[in-house]
Image: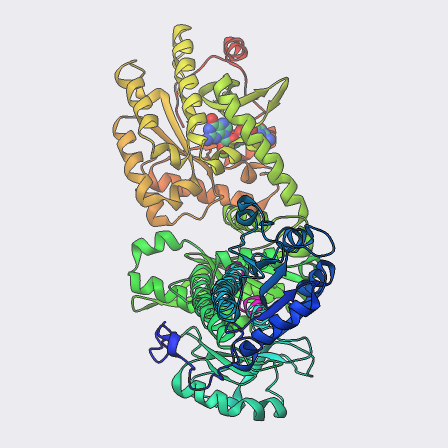
Amino acid sequence: MGDEKFIFKEEPEAASLTVVKQSKTKAKGKLLSVDDDESYQQSLLYSLNDFVANGEVDEILTANSATEAAALIATNEEIAVILLDVVMEEDDAGLRLVETIRNVQGNSLVRIVLLTGQPGAAPRKDVMEQYDIDEYWNKSEIDYDILKAVVGSNLRSWRSMYQLEQARLGLQLVIDASRKLASKYDKESFIQVVLNEVASLIGVGKNVPTLCVTTQSPEDTFDKSYVLAYTGSDHVQVGEPLPNHLFDKFTDLYEQAIIDHRHKFNGNLSVLCFPYDHEESGHYFILAEGLEQLSEYSIHLLQVFGENISSGFMKIALINQLSNLAYLDAELLIYNQNWLLRELQTMNHADRINTQLVVISIDNFDSQTLTFSERAMVQVINNTYEKIANLYHEVLGISRIEASTFAILCNSDEAIDDDVLVQFTNQINEFDGEMRNYSLTIVKVELADMLTSTPMQILYLSKSLLYSARQKGRDFVTYNPAYQERLLTDYQLLNDLKNAIVEHEFYLVLQPKVDLRTGQPVGLEALLRWKKNDEVIPPNVFIPIAENSGIITKLDLIALELTIEAIKALKQKGYQLPISFNATVKDLYESSYLALIENAIGIEHISPELLDLEITETQAMDSYDKVNPILEHLHDLHVHISIDDFGTGYSSLAHISKLAADTIKIDKTFITNLRDDEANQQVVELVLNLAHLCGFSVVAEGIETEEERDALLSKGCNIGQGYLYAKPMRLDELMEWLKSHQPQAVTD
Ligand code: C2E
Ligand code: MG
Ligand code: MG
């Protein structure tokens, strides 16, 4: 990792200057003589004394019975060679002791030299092999020189076997410790494991402090370091600077370590140093104080383990970097949606009760990106974020969960007032040199209302609330639990709806449009019905669900096919009535939908004047640039176009005048109680004037009373539909109705 000063690869000769050469692996070993013949044993000892005198063995132990010997061997780890009399308390006492040493005590290292006073009583060769015994001597044969040679060679074998065994155990320790390290991914628990494992590697006793310390940056001095983790009994506080007595004790060794960038050992003190992740640019040091001087062997183990610690720190630094990448928005360098989900995940019940989630989204961002420069849109995002950050000083976090949507987590006590949020929905920003207004939609959710929801559910609920707020044209909404229930019902209904498409559960009803002066039908509107089991579901329940889930065109294709069938059926009975059918913008973007209309005209020879496509004012105007050319195309084919629910949207005059339409349908809300409602009268008059100006005919929707009809007639509106004349009917009912209501040619 970036810091070139720290190179640990050449460790083997490291620290040698400070190492005190007292080694556990250079154990000399002890000799044990086991013999019930004490005089013989004395003469043996006399000869063996040289080994002690020359410093070749630590000690010579004696035992006069197999039992006594077994106890000695069990308590003396470093017995290297046993000179063992075969015949003692019993004839085979010596051999049974061998069996105990190897099989019961599990000591495979100790070298055993068998001695016997009875010539010809040699143990069997297979027994010698089984118990790993190389030497068998007749006491009478053995003299001083032979004894020295035999003991000397066995001592050497024991030492190399002992060293190998120690190395194996040490490596096992390092491997076990490293394995524990590998499972830790956060700094704190990693350091704690390092500390515990270092303590066990160097055999630090419980009363001896072992510390882990870090300095904040390479420039900082030792006195700036603080304790990250700690084992031992000294009173040391994690997070605090090193206490004075330890500071004094370790300063010199620490200075050497920092100069050489190496682990340092001196007597019973060790300073291990490790590079830190370069982002935070500091170093870790482990300061350890052992009970006794560290052996060269322990130092070696520490150095090997040190390699693993170093790579562990690097791994954690990498993981931290990855986690930064995973939880940050690359453009704004603020939190992203993953962060939000993680925060929601880690919140406990009490946190949730006291937390508010606010989602703020820029309206029409996608369509604006087509109109304005990329630079302008980046600026809108940045400025919006800054405004949000100014509004919310004290928050848990602001995250960007979609290109133009932010989510804020804050304490409910510090929540911003609704009035302020409502005001905040109106913003102003420079768009390519021009100051323009733009709007935000804000959704507020108290997490206390979502205690059992998963983070994903909270996120999706908030997003769907945002979506539905937009659809309803509301700029500020607060979540209420009934919403979630409705979502669930909608979800169930959507599944049923998909199934209904496969099962053909739809049929059409037709509502006459009449000449208000005569009551004679001039056309029909086709309205879709869903027969779900025995229940008839009205379109204002299933159409919005179909629109939101993208399956609306499938339904509208069905409605259009049934409309074409109805036109043919009516024609067969001699009726030439135009039928209007409801479409959405999505249908118009679908080639199969347009193809169905074109085929009906071209292949089935349906007169295009009998086809009347209705699209709502809101949809036609919102997507004017894209939709109007398609409407023009249909218009050119002589398909009739009606603008439905007129008056409920906000049309620009410039667009209305150029709209490729024939008819405007005034929404029912303006017809209701028309005779007494002045505001409605004004709207109706306005629409009639506008239609006259642009050359559209007008149909009034939802006429229920004669007063409404008379009011319309008095204003010059001559065509309408409503329960006053007829409810929507099935085709066979309509045929009956038509018998008493003779159609007339349309005139308005
Ligand atoms: P819309 O196109 O404005 O249809 C007029 C609605 O007003 C129909 O409701 C009709 O039954 C109702 N209506 C007619 N006269 C009266 C009246 O005098 N009083 C009252 N209270 N209501 C009256 P419906 O059939 O429930 O349809 C509701 C809406 O569902 C339709 O409004 C239309 O937007 C949509 N819709 C219906 N069928 C389809 C379809 O096949 N495709 C699409 N995309 N939307 C459809
Ligand atoms: Mg309609
Ligand atoms: Mg309508």
> In this view of the protein, which residue sits in the foreground, 277 or 532?
277
Q: Main secondary structure of the magenta part?
A: helix
Which range is magenta? 182-193
Whether residue 247 is situated above or below residue 91 in the rendered picture: below
Image coordinates of residue 543 in percent, x first then y, are 51, 32
Q: Residue at x 63, y 79 (%)?
A: 238
Image coordinates of residue 617 in percent, x first then y, are 43, 40
Q: Could one spot residue 226 in this view of the protein?
A: yes
> Is residue 222 rendered to the left or right of residue 333?
right
Quadrant housing the C terminus: top left
Whether residue 365 is situated above or below residue 213 in the rendered picture: above
Circle count: 0
Image coordinates of residue 634 in percent, x first then y, are 29, 30
Residue 651 forms part of the magenta stretch:
no
Quadrant housing the N terminus: bottom left
Image coordinates of residue 187 in percent, x first then y, are 53, 68
Q: Residue at x 41, y 74 (%)?
A: 279
Q: Residue at x 43, y 66 (%)?
A: 311
> Is residue 532 rendered to the left or right of residue 720?
right
Residue 189 forms part of the magenta stretch:
yes
> In this view of the protein, which residue sits in the foreground, 661 or 674?
661
